[in-house]
Image (cartoon, rainbow, N blue to C red):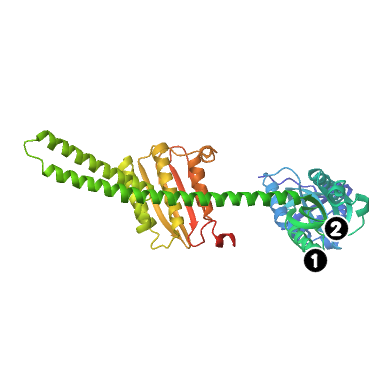
Amino acid sequence: MSHSRPFDEDLYRTLANSSQAGVYILQDGKFQFANPHIQEYAGYAEKAMLGMDSISLIHPVDRMSARRNAVRMLKGQRFSPYEFRIITSDGRTKWILETVTSISYRGRRAVLGNSMNITEQKEARNRLEELEALESSILDAIPHAVIGLHNRIFNFANNAVKAVFGWRPEELIGKSVRLLYRRDEDYEEIARLFYTALEKQRTFSTKFPCRRRDGVDILCMVRASRIGETLRERRIVVTYEDITERTQAERELEASREELRNLSVHQQTVREEERTRIAREIHDELGQSLTALKMDLSWLKNRLPPALKPLHLKARQMEQLADTTIEAVRRISTELRPGLLDDLGLAAAIEWQAEDFQNRSGIACEARLEAGEMELHRDLATALFRIFQETLTNIARHAAASRVGVLLDRDGERIILTVTDNGRGITKKQIDDGQSFGIIGMRERAHLWGGDLRISGSRGEGTTVRVSIPMRQPAPGSREEGQR
């Protein structure tokens, strides 16, 4: 906190009136003294200023910050001068640089202020900043076409406009930017987009169709930057990047990716159908044959003479082998294609798989099935079940977990499967590893159905796999899918 200083009023007036800086005294926020310099730049006579509320002189936008800075300086919390704007008597805006200190004036506490009119310096600084911004914008845009606009008229164009649009820079100066667009409607649309956006932000970009001088239509990435703090003078710098070939290449690449996805869908469908066929044949053909063989063994054993103990022992061993083989057939058939998935649906299959995983691995696995009744496409249910199986496989191989939680839920028209373990966790590098084919396959299955798969975790805090897929949609690769 600064202390009030003793004040020699006569000496002060003499010094203040000869000063080239604005000097004033405030009491209760009102001017008690103002030297000729402050009267000059504020545009008020001394009689008009005396008794005037000082805050009324400050630009409304700067009143709060100016007051805050003054209070901090009076408390000894700020030592550097601060800037703010004032409104002069004739309505002009001027920039002021000011310092204040606490004094005793006529027996009461007052504020002594010293100020300078820095409007010219501020404007020169702003002009320099605008020039630097223009130069920076141009340099950043090369080798793309760069133009400067003032009220939508060219006042600058770099050499790259020749390569992009076929115009020489000197041919554009003084002409309307409409030259670069196919139709007046296109020009009006891009102008509306840019000027609306640039009122709120310094830069804006969008893809937009343009036209070369020879009449060829091109697609450009158009980026605009305003010059200065506001768009009042409608001065902007615009860069144009011809992305026609790149966009066409991206379309072709996306079409190729779509073909690969459809091929992947077809392969997965064929694989699932083959697994289903093999599981059915194993269960029906091999299972029935083994059951018949066991019945024949039982018939034979019951007809052996009691005295032939070695043969009775061998028959029992053959029966046990038949039982083991039948169980193996049942297990292999179920792993190829769980009958529960087709007969009772996804929830029942997940519940069975969680229990089977717990019995096989010794890892506690709790499944909460809160999705309720669902009508899922058969292939979608298969995709979710295979993602679940792969997740459990990864947990068994890598997680070193002791507990797994499974939640099958729905959010509106999306079905959500979440699997969480308490194992060693997973790193971002492992998640993004291009050799993690299990994770890649899980993501691809989800993506084919318009869903997303997210994996999160950290060292020592376990891993969470969350897959979310829309419930009602045509199967990937189907005719309806292709027409979407």
Q: Is residue 57 visible?
A: yes
Q: Is residue 369 visible?
A: no
Label 2, label 1: how far apart the Cα atoms are: 16 Å
Task: Say which mark, if any, is on residue 147.
Answer: none
Question: Which element is circle 2 on?
Answer: loop
Quadrant where the image shows the N terminus: top right
Residue at point 82%, 61% (across, down): 182
| 78 left or right, relative to 182 | left
Residue 362's quadrant in the figure? Answer: top left
Question: Which element is circle 1 on?
Answer: helix
Residue at point 48%, 54% (across, down): 468
Residue at point 81%, 62% (across, down): 187
Where does label 2 land, which residue? 215
Query: Where 366 falls versus 345 (above or below)?
Result: above
Seen from the viewer's position, the closer of residues 5 and 241 is: 241
For the residue carrying disc 1, how many other residues have a C-alpha within 10 Å: few (<14), some (14-19), or many (20+)?
few
| 37 left or right, relative to 277 | right
Query: Which circle, 2 or 1, is nearer the viewer?
Result: 2
**Residue 233: where, in percent of width, then height?**
84, 58
For the residue carrying disc 2, how many other residues have a C-alpha within 10 Å: few (<14), some (14-19), or many (20+)?
few
**Residue 347: where, in percent of width, then height?**
37, 56
Quadrant where the image shows the C terminus: bottom right
Seen from the viewer's position, the closer of residues 278 and 130 is: 278
Task: Say which mark, if any, is on residue 185.
Answer: 1
Closer to the N terminus: mark 2 or mark 1?
1
**Residue 383: where, in percent of width, then height?**
46, 52
| 361 left or right, relative to 10 | left
Amino acid identity at mark 1: Glu
| 32 left or right, relative to 320 | right
Q: Do residues under tags 2 and 1 come within 8 Å of each other at their CB atoms?
A: no
**Residue 81: where, in percent of width, then height?**
76, 45
Amino acid identity at mark 2: Gly
